[in-house]
């Protein structure tokens, strides 16, 4: 059996991580060493644990997992597959534990092949992850980043993480696009059908935005506005289809959404994108023949606007 240098052996045995090192000798798996962390996990002494592993590795394994574990062990011993398994262990008077074991082969200086297996007790980890996730979701639901009606991220989230999403799109060699959506005549819809119907319409829109932009960052803005940060790919075709679905499935009469689009340059930030997309939306005014408009730097010029455009602009400027 392979013998570690005394210093290295001592270092490995003192590890807090649960580690066991094995060697195949005459077609039999023998235990070379186990770490302090492994002894603590198994609540056993090093001497007894080493002897027990040499005698039987499946003594405390749940019988439902034993066959799978044996098969994985054979494949790993033959270098056919990596060792990455989940299984349950526990004695007669013990609570069953969920264990995750990852193993790899290491060729030593003299050519001996040793199997290093690392064990993690996921029993408490799974509970901790569940509790941490629950706490985060409760915080997210009740506090700063989520719109309580649509369950979409809100403007706080967009301002905090929007630039990260834009940069991620750029890193994927795609062009980022900001779309600023608004529901025309939302107040009239509320007056005619009631505010509950208006809330239902906003939730319907949120659902279709998720459907048509599954990989985008979608946020709810103020009132009847929604913002989408996505890749600039078939954007106008998606808006046409999106509006058809909204109009077809809304409980009351609606013309769908109007959208201001801004193609982001390399220097643009989320704030710039929002301002430009919002401006392109405003410049459409009450033009019923247009569903969307693309931002142009010319929009920043003080050109005269028709009365309807000025009226729309003043009503939505705040």
Image (spheres, rainbow, N blue to C red):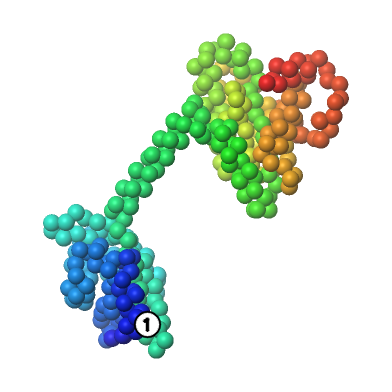
Q: Is residue 56 visible?
A: no
- Image quarter of residue 98: bottom left
Percent across and percent down for residue 25 are 28, 85
In-image side of 28 versus 313 (left or right): left
Residue 277 is drawn in which quadrant? top right
Please say if 113 is above or below 73: below
Which quadrant of the figure contains the C terminus? top right
> Which residue, as the protein is rendered here, is positioned at the far right?
303
At a point 61% along the width and 14% down the height, the residue shown is 187
Q: Which residue is mark 1?
A: 113
**Residue 51 at least partly seen:** yes
User: Residue at the spot x=69%, y=41% of the render?
Assistant: 269
> Is 188 positioned to the left or the right of 90 in the image?
right
**Between 280 and 119, the one nearer to me in the picture:** 119
How many neighbours does mark 1 have within 10 angstroms: few (below 14), some (14-19), or many (20 or more)?
some
Residue at screen point 36% across, 79% down: 8
Residue 189 position within the rendered picture, expressed as x and y whole percent measured from the top left: 59, 15
Q: How far across and down, in percent of the image, does residue 297 sit? A: 81, 35
Q: Position of residue 53 (x, y in %)?
A: 22, 73
For the point 65% across and 36% down, the residue is 238
Among all residues in the image, which is located at the extreme top?
192
Where 188 sits versus 2, above or below? Answer: above
Q: Nearer the viewer, residue 198 or 288?
A: 198
Q: Is residue 273 left or right of residue 220?
A: right
Disc 1 secondary structure class: strand
């Amino acid at each position: 059996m392979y013998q570690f240098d005394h210093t290295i052996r001592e270092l490995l045995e003192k590890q807090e991580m649960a580690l066991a090192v094995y060697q195949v000798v005459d077609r039999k798996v023998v235990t070379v060493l186990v770490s302090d962390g492994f002894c603590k996990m198994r609540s056993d002494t090093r001497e007894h644990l080493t002897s027990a592993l040499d005698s039987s590795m499946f003594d405390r394994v749940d019988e439902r997992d034993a066959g799978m574990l044996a098969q994985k062990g054979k494949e790993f011993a033959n270098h056919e597959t990596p060792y990455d398994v989940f299984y349950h262990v526990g004695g007669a008077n013990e609570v069953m534990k969920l264990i995750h074991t990852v193993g790899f082969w290491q060729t030593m200086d003299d050519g001996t092949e040793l199997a290093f297996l690392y064990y993690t007790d996921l029993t408490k980890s799974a509970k901790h992850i569940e509790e941490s996730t629950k706490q985060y979701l409760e915080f997210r639901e009740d506090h700063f980043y989520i719109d309580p009606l649509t369950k979409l991220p809100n403007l706080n989230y967009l301002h905090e993480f929007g630039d990260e999403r834009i940069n991620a799109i750029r890193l994927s060699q795609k062009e980022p696009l900001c779309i600023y959506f608004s529901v025309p005549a939302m107040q009239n819809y509320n007056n005619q059908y009631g505010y509950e119907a208006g809330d239902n319409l906003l939730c319907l829109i949120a659902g279709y935005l998720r459907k048509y932009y599954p990989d985008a960052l979608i946020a709810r803005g103020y009132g009847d506005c929604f913002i989408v940060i996505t890749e600039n790919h078939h954007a106008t075709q998606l808006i046409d289809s999106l509006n058809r679905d909204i109009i077809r499935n809304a409980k009351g009469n609606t013309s769908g959404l109007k959208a201001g689009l801004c193609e982001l340059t390399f220097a643009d930030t989320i704030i710039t994108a929002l301002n430009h997309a919002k401006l392109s939306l405003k410049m459409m005014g009450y033009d019923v023949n247009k569903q969307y408009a693309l931002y142009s730097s010319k929009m920043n010029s003080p050109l005269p606007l028709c009365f309807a455009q000025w009226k729309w602009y003043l009503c939505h400027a705040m």
